[in-house]
Amino acid sequence: MKIPELFKEYIWLVNTIYRARKISLSELNDHWLETEMSGGVDMARTTFNRHKDAIEDIFGIYIECDRKDGYCYYIGNPEVLEDDTVQNWMLSTMSLSNIISESMSLQERIIAERISVDEDILEQLTKAMKAGRRITITYRNSGSPQRYNTGLDPYCLKLFHQKWYVLGRLYDNKYELYCLNNIEDIEIQQHTFKIVKDFDPRSFFDDYYGVVIDDELPTERIVLRAYRDERFELRDVPLHHSQHFLQWNNDEDFADLELRLKPTLDFMDFLISKCVCLKVLSPQSLIDQLCDRMERGLNTYKINK
């Protein structure tokens, strides 16, 4: 998808101001003239102001002016570009799409991973969320031919490992996550709902690794030991926002790190997939569960010999 010219300018403006931290309109214009987008024409103040307003309306990103510091411009809410926010995701996606669309001569040498989602289902969901309407979905669990209907209040959407999920509050006040790929039909009901007053989507997922939720599981302090290159991988791409390193041992090629989360099944599956280079040091209860799951996995291979 090729990004419209105006959006290219919005993306460029946000990225340039964010990287500079603070920048005057004159300095901004100097950078602008270095781009092919400018066509050698200055960015007029009126154009800048229109772009600034559009960026606020579309992305919710505020470009502020510090009149006490030479009328320099800066991003007023930089956290939206640093956290797992929809603004950050949209800008990153658009920036990458723009780079690739301008390099179509390399299309056979660029391999992208597709996000599989039924756009009609996604559109209906966002429509229901905006209107505060309850929905009924026809759902099929992965690997099962059976379908069932369930009603829920759609609270939020979450993207994880190239799949979209909707978090719904059920009639019994419990929360469940549903993968959009497994929703076969959706019906928007007339019944309206209001989000629980103290509900916050980011706080809700704070203690979870991914998309398996279990409010009965306690949040635990988990200590891992990463060997060799896995240390650098986890340094560059943390497993969880609570992650921090306890020690880094260059002599013996390992590093210990700590997390605070609920040891859900998807987290355990991840640990098993990394068992050659990532070891759980504590708690013992998690070690026992992992050993049991790996032993059952080995038995599967022995049975099939």
Image: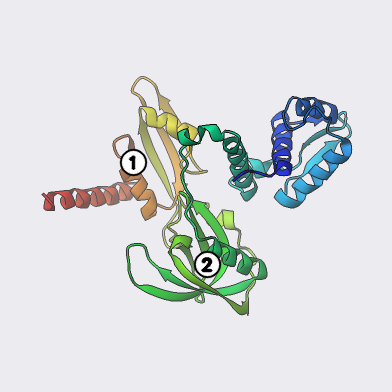
The residue at 36%/35% (across/down) is: 225
Q: Is residue 2 left or right of residue 32?
A: left
Of the numbered discs in the image, which one, if any, rests on residue 168?
2
Q: Relative to the observer, which residue lies in front, 139 or 275?
A: 139
The residue at 57%/61% (across/down) is: 156
Q: Residues within 10 Å of mark 2 (few under 14, many from 20)?
A: many
Q: Secondary structure at mark 1?
A: strand
Of the numbered discs in the image, which one, if any, rests on residue 280?
1
The residue at 89%/34% (across/down) is: 67
Residue 194's x, y, as percent?
A: 64, 71
The residue at 65%/43% (across/down) is: 3
Residue 61's x, y, as percent?
A: 73, 45
Residue 143's x, y, as percent?
A: 32, 63
Q: Can you name the residue that lies furthest to the left here? A: 305
Amino acid marked by disc 1: Val
Q: Secondary structure at mark 2?
A: strand
| Colouring | rainbow
Q: Is residue 266 above or below residue 281?
A: below
Residue 213's x, y, as percent?
A: 44, 59
Can residue 107 be seen? yes
Q: Relative to the observer, which residue lies in front, 116 or 234?
A: 116
